[in-house]
Amino acid sequence: MGANTSQVRDLAENPNLKTLVGTKSVSENDPFWNQLISFTFISPTRSGDSKLLEEAVAPLAKILIENNPRTGNFGALVRVFLGRTKELKISTECQDQLFIWQAHNALFMIRCLLKVFIREMSEQELHLQFSYQERAPETGSEDLLEELLSNLVHLIVEVPLLDITYSILFEAVTTLLVFFSYQLFHKDILRDGLIYQHIMKGRCSCLTSRLVKTLLYNFIRQEKCPPPATHIFEPKAEGSLLYGLASGVASGLWSVFTLGGAGSKAGVDEEHNPLPLSNQSLLLLLVLANLTDGPDWANPYRQAISCFRNTQDTSSLPVEQLHTFQINFNSLYTALCEQQRSDQATLLLYTLLHQNANMRTYMLSRTDMDNLVLPILEILYNVEERNSHHVYMALIILLILTEDDAFNRSIHEVVLKNISWYTERSLTEISLGSLLILVVIRTIQFNMTRTRDKYLHTNCLAALANMSAQFRCLHQYAAQRIISLFALLSKKHNKVLEQATQSLRGRQGDNTALPDYAQDLNVIEEVIRMMLEIINSCLCNSLHHNPNLVYALLYKRELFEQFRAHPSFQDIMQNLDTVIGFFSQRLEQAGTDLSVERVQEVIMKGVQALRGGDINLPLRLVTQHSWRNV
């Protein structure tokens, strides 16, 4: 930030801020508040800028914590904001930008102070900070904390999203997120906390469905931050926050606390965080959805997320559901497809697929599922660049989708051309199903050579197993990748066997290391069994659709020889031997020194004979694993 860093820190010397945190009590009707909240920079939306601001605010907030029990100035600031929220909707209709601007600034200051308060004190102590107030006859005994929470929710659901309201809506959502940050400082779930109680059971709960719907629409709309001229004013009154500072300071603060960032290149932050309200709304929605149930009540926000319906759904519900509402599924689906580069959007997709049967049915009925599946596959393909949580969520989404047989059939009918992000091979034309197989097996291979996470490769194999009965016209690369994975497993199996043998010989009867090798062998053999079941399922259900898999099996048939006599694999190996034997015999009959093209021709004729019913191979489906909900 260069010189601007020291300029932001100079805010600690501002006379108005000193009055706010000082020892003098200021009535909420004092003209001082108009001067205090007439400043010209808006909320930072980047982590670096936020940290810079927090460093400047923290010393002031700590002074306020000491003096507020005597002055009640924090409570007065909150009441100043609450007084303005009552007129926000009218101000929006009248385009009263000045009123909205000042209300935003008041909330911005409250949020900055709250962030320090929550880090420095318990929830009960925070509640006391709201209760300290100037002792005046007209002062009521309302719970100011609950009043603020309720007003923030009302603000979010009632004030329309326009250029002039964008910043205050962003602040309202962000302030609620700050309140929920108490959980970050506690290992135990805060079911008994005041904030949790107010949000789950208090006055806010009556707006549950409206809040969830509004946050979803904020995510759907993907509105960018409006240009500064729509919500920023130049300071006019002496004593305002920036008044009296050198002229360069104001412009420096402006560049720090807007999307441009001080000293940043044009467009850099647009790339990193172009949709602050959309992103914050999504985060708040996910926080609300994942609040735990109370001892005798269910989380109403999770209920709302699990039961909302399509606006085009005109059917009546057999039983009226709590907190239900309707939303445009097409718009939500489009936004989900476009935003999977962020892990929070992927978490929302997982949440909807897992918890909302209406949305899951709608997604699976789409004829353009490639728009949703391709971004998920891209996440897995770039596994090195993604955090583990993002990869896991993407994988579980595929697992949920592949539990649907219609999905497994349809993805082989979608033909894709020139997948730009798939750089290992040139895929000029491939089905979505074959691409899915390629990417999932690549993820398994990466996991086996790098992270060795059993959970990850088990769920990858589960997704493949769900699909295996519906494998159709596998691309040659997909078929090769299936067999190459088996080759890798076979190699690892042999290596562990060799290590166990060498260890046993070297120790001359000391068998202490053998249990470790036995455990490794059990894990590898379990994965080999899974892989054989996937190949076996494809052979039993769709052999006549997959000449490329037959070719790959024949080309690498020696891989399977060592497992014929293994007791764990004998039942499945009978099927593979039947298929390999059948096509091997046909190749022998075709002559020797066959070209690749001639081999493929012989396989195709054999496949056509199977498809026409001229030949019936005695294959039987053998499986020991349940692949649902792994």
Image: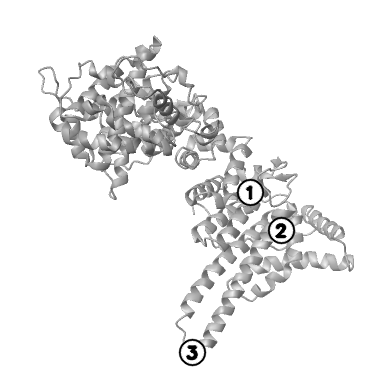
Q: Residue furthest front?
A: 246
Amino acid residing under circle 3: Gly
Say whether residue 456 is visible.
yes
| Residue in view at x 58 percent, y 77 percent | 497
The relative height of residue 419 versus residue 503 in the rendered view (above or below) is above
Which label number is shown at residue 509?
3
Amino acid residing under circle 2: Gln
Give the CA distance from mark 3 to mark 2: 42 Å
Say whether residue 83 is visible.
no
Residue 23 in the image: x percent, y percent? 15, 29
| Residue in view at x 73 percent, y 58 percent | 549
Q: Mark 1 sits on what residue? A: 436
Which label number is shown at residue 480?
2
Given residues 607 and 52, the one toward you in this image is 52
- Looking at the picture, the colour scheme in use is one colour
Q: Which numbered disc flags the more N-terminal residue, 1 or 2? A: 1
Q: Residues within 10 Å of mark 3 (few under 14, many from 20)?
A: few
The relative height of residue 588 versus residue 367 in the rendered view (above or below) is below
